[in-house]
Amino acid sequence: MASDTKHIIVGTAGHVDHGKTTLIEAMTGIATDRLKEEQDRGLTIDLGFASLKLPGGGTVGIVDVPGHERFLKNMLAGAGGVDIALLVVAADEGVMPQTREHVEILHLLESKQGLVALTKIDAVEEEWLEMVEDDLRDFLSGTFLNRAKIMRVSGTTGAGVGELIKEIDAMTQHAEQRPVQGPFRAPIDRVFTMTGFGTVITGTLISGTLKGGDPAHILPKGITTRIRGIQVHGKKQDEALAGNRVAVNMVGVEVSDIERGDVLLSPGYLQPSTALDVSVTMPAEAPGPLTTRSRIRLHLGTAEVIGRAIILGGHAIEPGARGFAQLRLETPVAAARGDRFVLRSYSPMMVLGGGSVLDPTADRHHTSDKNRIERLKRKLSGDPVDIIEDTLAVRETGLPAEEIARITELSVDEVKSALDQLIEEQRVIRSTNRFLHRVTSESAMARAVSIIKTYLASNPMKSDMPKEELRRSMGRAMDAKGFAALLGLMEKAGDVQAEDASITLPGHLPTLGDKERQLVESIESRYRESGVNPPLISDLEAEFGPIAKDVTAFLLKQGELVKVDIDLLFHKQAMTDAQSVLREYLAQHQQLTVAEFRDLIGSSRKYVVPMLEFFDRTKVTKRVGDQRMLA
């Protein structure tokens, strides 16, 4: 996959004053310290953002995080959406406390890929530089960065910056692309007002595809909104894909309504919860055990929430160990199974550990519930049921069983057994030969209904929407077979009414304003008066404009016109009269030619031939050679 087709986020990490912000400005030309206090103090306090054009033609987003320990919560808010970690270490100081803390956080978040920028190389001698690099390599041994390249750079002189950019470009070739299918989700890291636009949020789109006009929810607030506009890397876009840094302008939302930590996502996807069942990993260097009822700070996505940890199956998780816990929170969060998190102690604020969400909407249960603990073990180890549920959760149109087996590398028998259980538990729905995740498909169906409503509101004379146009509007991941399965579910639920090539909402009727009503009357009158010599649709479009096609479609739906051939319509009265003349003639003469029928009704061959073929198709007549007889 070429670099310009991937959507990747690079995030910095490292000790305060090690040159992260200066390096980003040297790479991108963008100063990420936007706050006046940051500029005055020369200290990054909050998250900063930039975009970097790569030599290969692509563009990556860069998240700059603060290095000072006082602003660690801001660093945590930016670390969760990172695909490639850029650890920044100053050559004149080497490994420092926040270097260690940031690497530990990235480890707890299961960062997979990264590289190291050894900055300020212009401030030290070569001998010192080699010593710092050796020390750095020893420190990184045993971490996810143990084989990472160490790039010598200077943000001040620009030395090595070009080589660093080339290395990032090369790494994007191997970075895993986030899933663009399924519901969209973007943890919010900034909220502000733009003159002429209103409320804007920014965040990293961690899954799905976001399109202008899409309905959206903001959780845990429970706000319903619609996407008015999208920017990616400062440019207006019709859509954004998972892995993009996005700025999103929303309809009907005030800045005071939302805050960092909220999540913008597809309607129906995820539910707010104050109880999470989780797997917790405690680093060997943790300040102490995580004990039951410990007050903690949960860092999940861009949110920081206070709660208590209830240890499951014991009373504590010791440093260097892993265990299960239920996090009972003071305010709700919107999480998905598999989300990574970091735990800090309430006070003093030190990193305790981290882990992954196993049940994002857990009910309160006994700490020694063996059945629950066994289920959490299966979730953690990758039980086929949970693997399949996760696979379907990011695919709006589901998959056939054989495709599920191929993707998950499970046997067909394992897949079928797991699907039976998921269907019984109402977590998966079957439509035709496809299996769809219940929550994900419900979200897609709600989006489809919203798109149809918008289309019909924008086209008041239309009674339905072309199916293919709806499929295209649903996004590039909406394949035809999956779309058909989704429509089947929507019809079964009574959400829509479908015909061969079109779809509408139950009970929907076209609405006509005064202008449209006058056009309908004018065009209907033209057909009625023209009789068996009607105007062509192309002629009407030349006279009345493109809306003439909508008017004739409306009159067809109302039964006032009859479609005889492509671009050839007759008024229903003209067809009734012509059929009466035809039947009366054939009752007396048994057969007639095209020329005889032409003379009978006073028309021309270009109208009479399609009309007779229509009567053949509708079993009024049958053709025998060049003659017509009653069928």
Image (tube, helix red, strand yellow):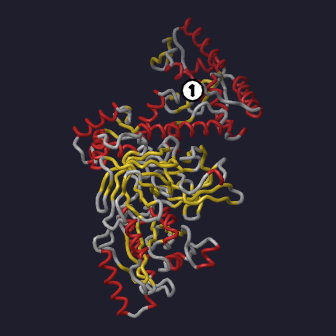
Q: Is residue 214 visible?
A: no
Total numbered badges shown on the rendered structure:
1
The residue lying at 41 percent from left, 78 percent from top is: 96
Please say if 164 is above or below 221: below
Please say if 35 is above or below 274: below
Task: Specify the quadrant that holds the N terminus.
Answer: bottom left
Side of 416 where 530 appears, left or right: right
Side of 438 where 195 appears, left or right: right
Q: Nearer the viewer, residue 53 or 76?
A: 76
Q: Nearer the viewer, residue 333 or 506?
A: 333
The residue lying at 44 percent from left, 46 percent from top is: 182
Q: Is residue 590 visible?
A: yes
How far from the left and from the top, in percent, is residue 192?
64, 59
Say which amino acid is labelled 1. Answer: Pro
Please say if 311 is above or below 174: above
The residue lying at 43 percent from left, 35 percent from top is: 484
Residue at the extreme top of the image, as rendered? 588
Side of 197 where 216 appears, left or right: left
| Residue where numbered disc 1 is placed | 506
Where residue 355 sits, quadrant-wise, is bottom left
SS at badge 1: loop
Q: Nearer the viewer, residue 221 or 297?
A: 297
How far from the left and from the top, in percent, is residue 494?
51, 26
How far from the left and from the top, in percent, is residue 444?
48, 40
How far from the left and from the top, in percent, is residue 611?
57, 23
